[in-house]
């Protein structure tokens, strides 16, 4: 009995035994009936498979398009052909330069600049596996005719709706220009739209980006003043850290119990080997102030880190993946030692591997999920047939 003779209920039971999202995506590309069963809400609720990372893109510079490298941990049986993730479907001749600005889910945000005298610049959102793309309308800001995407920060976000997730019909692009008329210009483009939404805030002198945590982007002036941008509502707020005893080195972390942002600063008292953790007391209302308070102070020691001595340390700009922790670097001959410090138990875990401060930037790419693409099959010459 062929698979087409199986009732949907039995076919669903067979497909539920595929525990890898990669195998499910391959099954979904077999025929329209299988795709319909796999993409149904009932099946996805039973399977519950998370999106699978296929690999990462790396910028090569110049006219070379970004290169895709498959995830090394994929088994030989589940190995993928890198040609399926090539970016040759995005229009552009040999004179264009290419840069990956960001990635989210199965989407890439590309910066494309042609080699003509006009030096046309575009932002392009694409989904490599399905070979779909959309060119974002130009961003214009009076009195300047256009914004330079090269120096601007551009990131991909989901559309912010109740469904969640991100896809070609469900994304937003946030563009930040930090030196626009002595202020920070924030612009948002939503999929399906035709124009950008804009807002701005006056930029204090020496303001620099700290990072992103809990959906907000933070800047610090090197003293006690900070500015935050809610990336969902596109609203700015400002606040002052309530402590004079901190230096110009701050970082971000996430609280273990509430997943809210924490501002982590180095203290200046004594030998300067302690941390101060600040938490937000109330939510700002966009454009106004908000209050933060000192939550805890951690005195670092060589014994805590398992080192013979501790003279100084640095906070890293990378947000720790694990909530309730802060990441620090201790200078050492040859290569700095990195630690993940639990803000509650004060237990430090040494991090192995290369120093993140010098790693090349990788842009992870996931398989599209849920599998809502047209049923198709891939041939050896990388052609897609429906």
Image: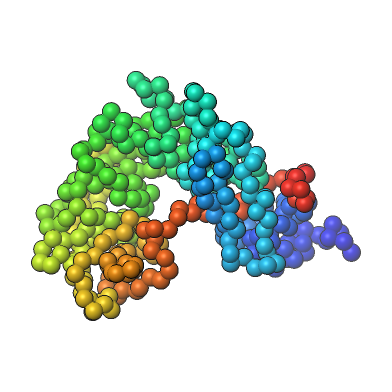
Given residues 151 and 226, the one toward you in this image is 151
Please indicate whether residue 177 sits to the left or right of residue 164 in the image: left
Q: Residue at x 87, y 61 (%)?
A: 2
Q: Residue at x 63, y 60 (%)?
A: 21
Visible in this render: residue 324?
A: no
The percent position of residue 190, horizontal first and vertical second, equals 49, 35
Check the image and report above or below for 370 versus 304.
above
As drawn, the residue found furthest toward the front would be: 334
Check the image and report above or below for 70 versus 115.
below
Please indicate whether residue 175 sits to the left or right of residue 282 in the image: right
Visible in this render: residue 86?
A: yes
**Quadrant of the rendered image containing residue 78:** bottom right
Check the image and report above or below for 192 versus 81.
above
Given residues 267 and 332, the one toward you in this image is 332
Please indicate whether residue 16 sits to the left or right of residue 58 in the image: right
Q: Residue at x 33, y 55 (%)?
A: 317
The percent position of residue 99, horizontal first and vertical second, equals 50, 42
Please indicate whether residue 3 sits to the left or right of residue 316 in the image: right
Given residues 215 and 329, the one toward you in this image is 329
Quadrant housing the C terminus: top right
Q: Residue at x 39, y 37 (%)?
A: 151
């Amino acid at each position: 009995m062929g698979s087409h003779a199986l009732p949907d209920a039995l076919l669903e039971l067979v497909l539920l035994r595929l525990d890898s999202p990669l195998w499910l995506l391959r099954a979904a590309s077999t025929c329209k009936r299988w795709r319909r069963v796999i993409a149904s809400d009932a099946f996805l609720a039973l399977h519950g498979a998370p999106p699978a990372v296929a690999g990462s893109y790396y910028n090569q510079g110049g006219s070379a398009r970004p290169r895709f490298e498959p995830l090394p941990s994929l088994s030989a049986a589940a190995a993928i052909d890198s040609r399926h993730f090539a970016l040759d479907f995005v229009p552009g001749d040999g004179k264009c330069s290419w840069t990956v600005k960001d990635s989210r889910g199965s989407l890439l945000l590309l910066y494309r600049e042609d080699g003509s005298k006009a030096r046309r610049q575009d932002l392009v959102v694409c989904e490599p596996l399905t070979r779909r793309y959309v060119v974002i309308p130009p961003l214009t800001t009076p009195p300047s005719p256009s914004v330079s995407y090269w120096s601007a920060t551009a990131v991909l976000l989901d559309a912010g709706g109740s469904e969640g997730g991100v896809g070609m019909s469900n994304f937003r692009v946030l563009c930040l220009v930090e030196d626009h008329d002595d202020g920070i210009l924030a612009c948002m483009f939503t999929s399906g739209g035709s124009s950008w939404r804009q807002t701005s805030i006056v930029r204090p002198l020496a303001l620099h980006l700290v990072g992103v945590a809990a959906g907000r982007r933070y800047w610090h002036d090197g003293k006690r003043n900070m500015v935050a941008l809610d990336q969902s509502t596109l609203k700015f707020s400002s606040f002052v850290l309530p402590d004079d005893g901190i230096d110009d080195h701050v970082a971000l972390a996430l609280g273990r119990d509430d997943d809210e942002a924490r501002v982590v600063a180095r203290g200046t008292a004594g030998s300067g080997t302690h941390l101060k953790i600040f938490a937000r007391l109330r939510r700002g209302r966009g454009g106004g102030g908000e209050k933060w308070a000192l939550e805890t102070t951690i005195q670092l020691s060589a014994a805590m880190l398992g080192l013979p001595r501790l003279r100084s340390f640095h906070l890293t700009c990378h947000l720790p993946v694990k909530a309730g922790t802060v990441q620090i670097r201790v200078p050492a001959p040859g290569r700095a030692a990195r630690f993940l410090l639990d803000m509650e138990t004060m237990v430090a875990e040494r991090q192995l591997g290369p120093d993140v401060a010098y790693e090349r930037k990788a842009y992870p790419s996931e398989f599209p999920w849920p599998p809502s693409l047209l049923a198709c099959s891939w041939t050896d010459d990388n052609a897609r047939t429906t």
